[in-house]
Image (cartoon, grey):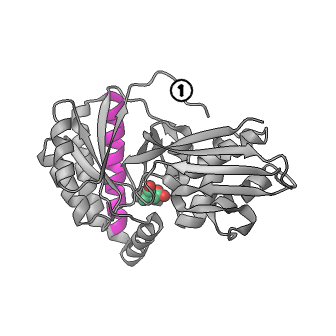
Amino acid sequence: MPAVSAHAPGKTILCGEHAVVYGQPAIAIPVTQVQARAVVVANPRGSANQIRITAPDIHLDDFLENLPESHPIRQLLTNLQNSLQLPHFPAFDLRVTSTIPIAGGMGSGAAVSVAIVRAVSTFLGRPMTNEQVSSLAFEVEKSYHGTPSGIDNTVITYAHPIFFIRGQPFESLHVCQPLTFLIANSGIKSETAAVVSDVRQAWQNDPHRYEALFHAIGTLTVQVRRRLERGPTEEIGGFLTANHQLLQELGVSCTQLDKLVDAALSAGAQGAKLTGAGRGGNILALVNEENIAAVSTALRNAGATNLYLTNLMPATSEVEK
Ligand code: MEV
């Protein structure tokens, strides 16, 4: 049997992170320049449930049964087996690789889960729908991130810009004009679960103040959506920068992220903000042909370790549900 492979992109959040955990809307877009990939190869001589997993990025080379039950790949495969009601798996080798920075706010964990579910379910002859794939990835997110909104697994599964409200069906976004974003990595690793949990603690200590901030972020996200879909897109940058200021007030920025945002704005970006959980990971900047070179240079000079370019193009086709 030939090898079966599947991949999934990274993601970035355009606006609404953290507030989305509390029921406010957020907008996320896929970043296809980075990918997680899973390859499954049958092992015809192996016994039932003999699954060898290699994942060089996390220095993993072991059999599934040796992984702790709490290991995300073990959890994912157990949930997949239950959901397909399989008494056991046939023997196979699973190789997982990824160019998505780990703990960099680009959804590396969710992308790995999506790629694995797609590759293994296809290998088994029972390919899953996007809805099933996203829901299995979400189960793993929940045990690692505590209270995730579900935005990461959704945008990564559907690989399409989305307007997302927790617990509601997502909406596909179609932009009215091409837009270009530069994503700059701060080089600082950040655990989403820890930042989300700190925000929860702060909200519990001062619900009035935090709910006002979440609401302000939600209002601004609706404004961004309107301008993405109908224009004028020139106004989007200001909203993104305002979102960064609200994220600072939430306490999820840090000196290096602020430095990168300031560098992008000083070099001419129309708007800039941290993206994802914060305290590290990435910022994104809205750029155009005239300023992209200057903004890239400014970001590198300010310490960005990696730059990724992602475009939003007016779409013509609907997303498969
Ligand atoms: C992480 O990519 C986005 C957060 O809003 C957490 C979540 O939505 O699950 C910080």
Report the quarter where the N terminus lies: top right
Q: Residue at x 60, y 66 (%)?
A: 143
Above or below 4: residue 232 = above
Mark 1 = which residue? 318
Above or below 98: residue 309 = above
Q: Quadrant of ligand 1?
A: bottom left
Residue 134 makes an appearance in the image: no
Question: How many residues crowd around disc 1 within 10 Å: few (fewer than 14), some, or many (20 or more)?
Answer: few
Q: Indicate left or right for 85 with 278 as reference.
A: right
Residue 143 makes an appearance in the image: yes
Q: Residue at x 25, y 59 (%)?
A: 257
The span picked out in magenta is 210-230
Q: Indicate left or right for 311 with 70 as reference.
A: left
Instruction: Specify whether residue 229 is painted magenta.
Output: yes
Q: Indicate left or right for 191 with 295 as reference.
A: right
Instruction: Specify whether residue 246 is painted magenta.
Output: no
Quadrant location of residue 40? Answer: top right
